[in-house]
Image: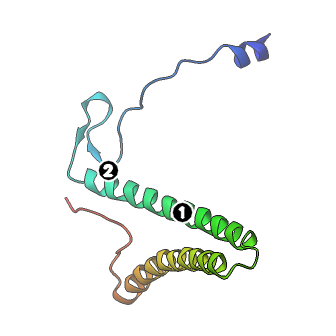
């Protein structure tokens, strides 16, 4: 009976957890947003951008490959498919190169440029 109860009777769900960490000052219901919250916001936005860049590459790569397979030897369709594949690969290389450039700057200068931190 216990297994059936767990499967079919949901546990309570809460809208959100209390804020904690470096983005807020205080804890629980008394948490107040601080200027360091911009660092958290920037990090979240960067993660979303990288996710969508990868998703865009994947979709463009599949689309270009499908166009290439269905071009039937037509030079215009083949050129369009090749262009789509080229743009997808250039975009992926651009995202990877930008991360590697930041890592190179970090290793060369010693400055932590991959973490967005606002000092207190």
Q: Quadrant of the N terminus?
A: top right
Which of pointers 1 and 2 lies earlier in the amino acid sequence? Answer: 2
- Image-based side of 74 in relation to 51, left or right: right
Q: Please, which residue is most extreme toward the bottom here?
A: 108
Bin the neighbour count of mark 2 within 10 Å (Cα to Cα): few under 14, some 14-19, many 20 and up: some
Height in image: 16 above or below 49?
above
Q: Position of residue 95 (x, y in %)?
A: 48, 74
Q: Which mark is residue 56?
A: 1
Name the residue tied to disc 2.
22
- Image-based side of 15 in relation to 68, left or right: left
Element on which disc 1 rests: helix
Element on which disc 2 rests: loop
Q: Position of residue 73 (x, y in %)?
A: 75, 79
53 vs 15, nearest the viewer:
53
Bin the neighbour count of mark 1 within 10 Å (Cα to Cα): few under 14, some 14-19, many 20 and up: some
109 vs 98, nearest the viewer:
98
Tell me whether circle 1 and circle 2 mark residues in contact (CB < 8 Å): no
Which image quadrant is residue 65 in? bottom right
Residue at 29% from the left image edge and 63% from the top image edge: 117
120 vs 5, nearest the viewer:
5
Q: Which mark is residue 45?
A: none
- Image-based side of 30 in relation to 67, left or right: left
Residue at 64% from the left image edge and 70% from the top image edge: 64
Which image quadrant is residue 83 in? bottom right
């Amino acid at each position: 009976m216990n297994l059936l109860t767990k499967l079919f009777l949901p546990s309570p769900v809460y809208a959100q957890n209390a804020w904690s960490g470096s983005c807020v000052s205080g804890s629980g219901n008394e948490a107040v947003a601080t200027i360091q919250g911009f660092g958290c916001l920037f990090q979240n936005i960067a993660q979303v951008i990288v996710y969508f860049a990868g998703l865009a590459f994947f979709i463009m790569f599949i689309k270009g490959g499908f166009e290439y397979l269905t071009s039937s030897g037509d030079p215009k369709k083949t050129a369009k498919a090749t262009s789509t594949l080229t743009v997808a690969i250039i975009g992926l290389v651009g995202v990877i190169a930008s991360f590697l450039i930041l890592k190179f700057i970090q290793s060369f200068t010693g400055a932590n440029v991959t973490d967005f931190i606002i000092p207190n």
